[in-house]
Amino acid sequence: MVLTATTVTLYIGNIILSHYIKEEIWVKRIWKNLFPPKSFKVELMNSIDETIREFETSHPYEKDGIKFPFYYSKILDDILVKHILFNNYQYNSEYISNELQNNPNIIIPTNKEIENFFQLFVSKIEANKELKKLFIAENYQSRIFVLAEKIDSIIEILKKAELTPEIVVNKTREQVEFQIRKQITSGKYIPDTFVEIDELKDHLRYFIAPYLFIDRIIGEIKKFNFDYLRKKLILKNKNINFDFNIDLISNSSFNVSNDELNKNVSLLNDYLHGKYDELESNRINASSSFTRKIQNKIDDLHFIQSKIIIIKGNAGQGKTNFLCDLAENVLLKRNIPSLFLTGYELDANDLYTSISKRLFPGSDYTFSDIFSRIDSYCEINKTFFILMIDGLNENTNPPKLSQNIELFINEILQHKHVKVVLTCRTEYFKNNFQNILDSDFKESLIQIDSINSHLDDNHKRCLYESYCSYYNLKINHISDDIYKELVTNFLLLRIFSEANKGQNIATLTHIYKEEVFQKYYSLKSFEINNRLKDTLTTPIIGEFDIKNLFSAIIEYMIEHKAFENIPIDSLLKTDNRNRDIYIRFLDENILLRKDIEEQNGIFGNKEFVNFTFDEFRDFLITDYLLNNLYENSKDKFYLFIEENINNKSRIKEGCMSFIFSMERLKGNFELSSFIRKQDWYGEVFPYYIFDIKDEYVTTDDKLELKSKFLNDRDISEHITFSLAYQRWNAEDFPNLNIQLLFEIFETLTDDEFKNNVYKIYPEKRYSHYDRFEKDQLEKLIERLEDILGNEDFSISPSRHNIFQYILYFLPIKHEINYLYFSYWKKYNNQLHFEQILNCQSEKLKESVNNFIARYEIQL
Amino acid sequence: MKYSYKSYESLLVVDKRLTKDLFVEMAGVQKGKYAADMFSRMYDWIFSEAVYVEDDYKQFYEVEYPNLENFIYKKYCVRKGSLKKMLQLKAENENYIIIAFDELSTGYGGFIDFAFSDELYDRFINFLLMKENEDKV
């Protein structure tokens, strides 16, 4: 046993106590009550008691006046305690005997009796486990605590030694993979849909992996050919020998270390700048081709050297999609270490901890522990570490983040292998993060103002194909109009392809938007409700349905007759308990967006909600009007329609179209009568009737179309093209189809044909740019020649209808003769002649009769 | 085969054995004459700064894309039908390669209307593929 301070205290306490306790008390052993139960002292006394009782049984004493046996004496007790506390304090029978004799009232034992007593006592002590436990607890507790602290710190040191660069890099990889999965689930990332436009993705590649891509840039610069320029300079009598040779610089090593890379890229950059200036100061006509290619490479090198990129853009432009694509395809596939956070995930008050906790939740690793490993990994593997923060605007504390992110970036960029990519909504950046542009690191910063803003036809097609492929949507034939509508409105493409996921559409000539929107809205509400319930860290309070937020927006719009900039605070009043969840949803969905409006004065900026897609808003307004407002208060409904759905309204176009189609679904005579009496209804009828499903078109609608055909040329054109180009197929449109057009044509006079039908195909004008350009009718003839040669009409009998249609244009296009005769030879179809010869138009009949005669057709 | 993926930027399938000397020789012009110089410049216009697509893919992009076809489709946004034809043509001869060239960067923009005019298009494309001159290699 080790003598401890506690032991000594206990012993001294025992001595002091003995001064105050009379021998009688000791003899009666009532002192035990003075100590707290379950202490070492009490337990020791219990063992002494037990020893005395057992010894007393085997060695009874005879009472002799006031004398008592030695084992009841305080002196023995003291010796026993000393024996235990002071490491088996050696006893001596004679010494004890002498000590006992100090008290005349003690019956003095023999030496043998003392030895027996001690043997019994020792055996009792050894058998008492509780005594040992209490001894450790009372004597070693503080020591154990100190030791535990020391062991913890040793474990901590060992743990940190275990945190190898590889472990950190693996963790960052897991984090990036997790973030990508999260963005796929939220719908902000659609894999494989990013289309490479211009140099944007390559520039980001150069930024991310400069050691690799510097070789590509150098290779391209080395190939620069200035022969034509030199020739021109000679011709222009300019006494300049334009020399261009980067061998001296390019032979240096660019990928040995970061310092070498920077040094050599700077040299190359200076050289190119010099050459650029040389060309500019000796401008000739062809100079721009050469300055352009030099400037392009200067731009490339800027990305190689820069340390921070800020990508700005409007809502829904695809910033997250781009960053995810970059992370998945450029970073992960090249094993470039990176971290991918969202603005929402950052704690603006402590960016360092919020980042380290994202990587190692529950551990004590500090930011500097982690980044020291990243530094050494990058140094060894000659790579950069890319920190990506998507959507600074999504942070819950933008003013604080704005202050701290500048300091944070400034510090993190001190690590020479770290680069940063940030994204932010343009207007939020302007309001909150503009300070970054004036920071100490502004020289290493590149701003990208927008992505996907200039898509050419190739890019649009690629994007269209990517969406169809991702959503496993097969469209065998799509009309030009619908294709154009989808590729010029990618939100519609997104909604359409997601709503029709996994479908096989043979022919797409029309999009019934109310049907698509309804499907998408139900699908997304269901998904969002489930996702928010499953993944949010903030608990949802009470009944939660994201549709409530949409309803609150629409109700606000209708009540206030305001269709944009709905104040967030007014919306969240109804369910303020789940405010954070709604705000989170606004940041990560594609249907609604948060907007900021700068306000002067003490109230600062205000946030609003807007729909990203006006047509979707108009659909929800119409749905609410017909299914809620009309049901609850017809008067309010009538008033709203009369006051807000008119030519002055900003929601008129979308709402008119949806009211037109959706009121039919309700089958309510009173409602239909009211709608059809509106001033605008007659005007839009010849246009919108083609937007509703064939089954909802009535006989009255067809009569109405016939009666309006001659109202003006635009209407004639729209009805003709809609029936001929979109509804030629009577199998797909058994109700309203091209046959109605033939019925109309039958009644038209020569003048009516001339003014309302033939003019829809204007004659070809001379084109300076394309001498071979065909007019629209010629293109149709060409297409029909193709169809005639390649398609089997027995599979699609409605194809005959288009050949009947083209026959009506025989009087204005000679080429139709050859086409139709080929058709006649193949199909011998007399029905077309029969129907056309019943027409009122004399010129048309004359042309057809001439055709019959010319080709000697026997009817 | 030529495919314009951007204004004045195209992909071409060519025979990799086609050197400048062969190009001038195949044109049937006399060395030292103006025509020889013109064909020499025409060769430079196409080849001097061209990106050799497959080499570029292998050296810098292979890790990102499952195959060359996907790389060309994504990076150059080539129409699927045209890409299929391009790769079919490339597969016809092991010496055929795909290059990307900027029609304006060397300054010889005047060749565009000549070499790829309607009248000369097929002949020039076959010329680049050495269709009738394999024996000259």
Image (cartoon, rainbow, N blue to C red):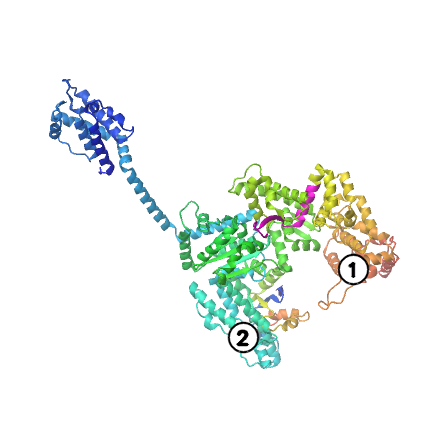
Residue A94 coordinates in the image, percent (x, y): 11, 29
The amino acid marked with disc number 1 is Tyr
Q: Is A818 colored magenta in this rendering?
A: no
Residue B81 coordinates in the image, percent (x, y): 63, 59
> Quick one: label 2, few (<14), some, or many (20+) residues within 10 Å?
some
Chain of the residue displaying label 1 = A
Task: For mark 2, give the secondary structure.
Answer: helix
Task: For mark 1, give the secondary structure.
Answer: loop
Location of residue A19 with respect to B1 vertically, above or below: above
Location of residue A423 with respect to A571 vertically, above or below: below
Label 2 sits on residue = A278
Q: Is residue B62 visible?
A: no
The magenta stretch is A599-625
* C-alpha gap between disc 1 and disc 2: 56 Å
Q: Is residue A316 left or right of residue A481?
A: left
- Residue A550: which numbered mark, if any? none
Chain of the residue displaying label 2 = A
Q: Could you say which quadrant of the image residue A133 lies in? A: top left
Residue at 16%, 26% in the rendered image: A116
Q: Is A621 colored magenta in this rendering?
A: yes
Q: The C terminus of chain A lies in which quarter of the figure?
A: bottom right
- Residue A761: which numbered mark, if any? 1
